[in-house]
C-alpha cells in the first residue's frame, strides 16, 4: 500500500486534509503546489520535506526560495512549475485539489506520465471529461474519486457490473439555505452563504454548495467517472450528510455508503485503494444519528442545479461555459460585488450567448473558458453601467 504522492493545491482545504491523511498513513510526500499561500506552504515543506514544490505566483515563488534556502527542496513557479510537480519522478499518485479549471492541464500531464489520479478537482472532468477519461484509458491510469459523493458511488459499485445499474443517487446536504424559497434568498449575505451546516470546505466550494452548483458539477463529473447517461443520475437532498450517495441496481437493490461527514475518509480511500486502513477519524454512531430524511432539490429556488443538468444534456463546450461563468460569478460574490441570486442569473445569461462545439479539443476548451470568463465580467460591467 505504501505510495509516494504529490499534491496539487496543498494549501487548500482538501490539500491540508490530504497531508493529515498522508501523515497518518506514513506516505512519502514528494511534491506540493500552491497558488500564493507561501506561509502555509513553507510550514508544509518543513514538516514533510518534499523533493520539489511549485508556486503559481512568480513573485511569491521567489520569496519562498529565499525563505527555505536552508532546505534541499526545489522551488518552481507558474503553470510550468506546477506541471513539473504533476510529473515528478517517483510519485505513484497525484492528488489534484487545485480549485477551478487551473487543475486541468496539470492533471492531463500527470495522466500522460502514468500517474494515478486522486481527483478532488471537479472542473477537470466537468470541462474535459471525454479527453481526460480517454487519456486515462490510453495510459492505463486509475482515476480515483476524492469527493465524498463520488467516492461513495465508487465503493457501492465495487464488485458489481455497471450494466446492472438502474441509477446512481447523489446526495446533497442542501447547504445553508435548504428549504428557503427564491424570494427569501434575495437578501442573503456572504457570511450566511459561507456557513455550511455539515462540511468544512474552502470558500469557493462552500458557495457552490449554497447555490447547489456543487451538486450540478458533481452530476457532470459522475457522468464521466462512471460512464452513465444523464437519465441514470439523480440528486436527492439529504440534510444529515450521513448517506454520502447510493446506487440502485436493476433488481431494486439500493446500496448506500454511510459515514461521518469528514473529507479525510474518502481522501484516505483514494490513497489506499483497493486496501483500507485504520485511522483516528470520528466514527459514525448510528445510535446517535438523527433520522435520515430525503427531499427533492428545489430547482426554482436553486436554478444552478437545473443549469448544470441542461449544460450536460447539450454537451460539448456547454459545461465549460457553465463552469467558467460560475467561477467568475462566485469570485465576484465572495468579493461582495454581486448578490447571491446574481450568480445563477449571470451563468444563465452567458450560457444563452454560447454556440456549442460538440467535439472540442483541449485548445478549444481553453479558448471557450477564456471567452466565458470575459463574457461574465463584461456582463457585470454592463449591469453596473445601467445602475
Image (spheres, grey):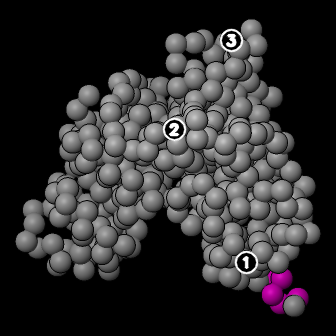
Give residue 385's mark. none
Q: Which residues are magenta?
A: 382-386
Q: Residue furthest top?
A: 251
Q: How many marks?
A: 3
Residue 140 visible from this viewpoint: yes
Which quadrant holds the C terminus?
bottom right
Q: Alpha-carbon distance for marks 2 and 3? A: 29 Å
Residue 103: x and y in percent read 48, 53
Drawn side of residue 181 relative to residue 31, left or right = right
Question: Mark 2 falls on what kind of element?
Answer: loop
Residue tagged 3: 164
Q: Residues within 10 Å of mark 2 (few under 14, many from 20)?
A: few
Question: Mark 1 falls on what kind of element?
Answer: loop
Q: State whether residue 225 is above or below residue 375.
A: above
Tag 2 near tag 3, CB within 8 Å = no
Q: Alpha-carbon distance for marks 2 and 1? A: 32 Å
Drawn side of residue 69 relative to residue 2, left or right = left
Q: Residues within 10 Å of mark 1 (few under 14, many from 20)?
A: some
Residue tagged 2: 284
Q: Residues within 10 Å of mark 3 (few under 14, many from 20)?
A: few
Which quadrant holds the N terminus?
top left
Give residue 189's mark. 1
Of residues 278 and 275, the one nearer the viewer is 278
Q: Residue at x 32, y 80 (%)?
A: 59
Amino acid at each position: 500500500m505504501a505510495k509516494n504522492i504529490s499534491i496539487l493545491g496543498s494549501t487548500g482545504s482538501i490539500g491540508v486534509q490530504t497531508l493529515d491523511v498522508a501523515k497518518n498513513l506514513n506516505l512519502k510526500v514528494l511534491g506540493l503546489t500552491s497558488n500564493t499561500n507561501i506561509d502555509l506552504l513553507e510550514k508544509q515543506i518543513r514538516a514533510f520535506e518534499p523533493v520539489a514544490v511549485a508556486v503559481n505566483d512568480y513573485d511569491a515563488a521567489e520569496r519562498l526560495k529565499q525563505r527555505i534556502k536552508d532546505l534541499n527542496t526545489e522551488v518552481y513557479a507558474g503553470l510550468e512549475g506546477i506541471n513539473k510537480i504533476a510529473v515528478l519522478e517517483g510519485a505513484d499518485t497525484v492528488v489534484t485539489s487545485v480549485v477551478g479549471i487551473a487543475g486541468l492541464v496539470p492533471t492531463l500531464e500527470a495522466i500522460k506520465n502514468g500517474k494515478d489520479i486522486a481527483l478532488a478537482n471537479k472542473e477537470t472532468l466537468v470541462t474535459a471529461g471525454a479527453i481526460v477519461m480517454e487519456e486515462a484509458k490510453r495510459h492505463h491510469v486509475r482515476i480515483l474519486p476524492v469527493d465524498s459523493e463520488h467516492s461513495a458511488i465508487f465503493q457501492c459499485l465495487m464488485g458489481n457490473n455497471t450494466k446492472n445499474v438502474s441509477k446512481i443517487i447523489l446526495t446533497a446536504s442542501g447547504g445553508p439555505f435548504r428549504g428557503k424559497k427564491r424570494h427569501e434568498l434575495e437578501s442573503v449575505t456572504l457570511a450566511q452563504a459561507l456557513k455550511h451546516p455539515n462540511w468544512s470546505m474552502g470558500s469557493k466550494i462552500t458557495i457552490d454548495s449554497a447555490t447547489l452548483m456543487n451538486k450540478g458539477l458533481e452530476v457532470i463529473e459522475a457522468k464521466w467517472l462512471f460512464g452513465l447517461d444523464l437519465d441514470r443520475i439523480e440528486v436527492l437532498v439529504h440534510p444529515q450528510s450521513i448517506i454520502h450517495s447510493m446506487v440502485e441496481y436493476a433488481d431494486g437493490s439500493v446500496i448506500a455508503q454511510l459515514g461521518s461527514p469528514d473529507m479525510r475518509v474518502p481522501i484516505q480511500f483514494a490513497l489506499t485503494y483497493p486496501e483500507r486502513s485504520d485511522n483516528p477519524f470520528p466514527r459514525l454512531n448510528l445510535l446517535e444519528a438523527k433520522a435520515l430524511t430525503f427531499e427533492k432539490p428545489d430547482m426554482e429556488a436553486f436554478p444552478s442545479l437545473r443549469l448544470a443538468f441542461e449544460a450536460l444534456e447539450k454537451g460539448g463546450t456547454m459545461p465549460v461555459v457553465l463552469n467558467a461563468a460560475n467561477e467568475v460569478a462566485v469570485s465576484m460574490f465572495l468579493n461582495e460585488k454581486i448578490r447571491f441570486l446574481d450568480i445563477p442569473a449571470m451563468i444563465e445569461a452567458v450560457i444563452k450567448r454560447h454556440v456549442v462545439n460538440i467535439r472540442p479539443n483541449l485548445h478549444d476548451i481553453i479558448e471557450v473558458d477564456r471567452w466565458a470568463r470575459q463574457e461574465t465580467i463584461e456582463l457585470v460591467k454592463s449591469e453596473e453601467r445601467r445602475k
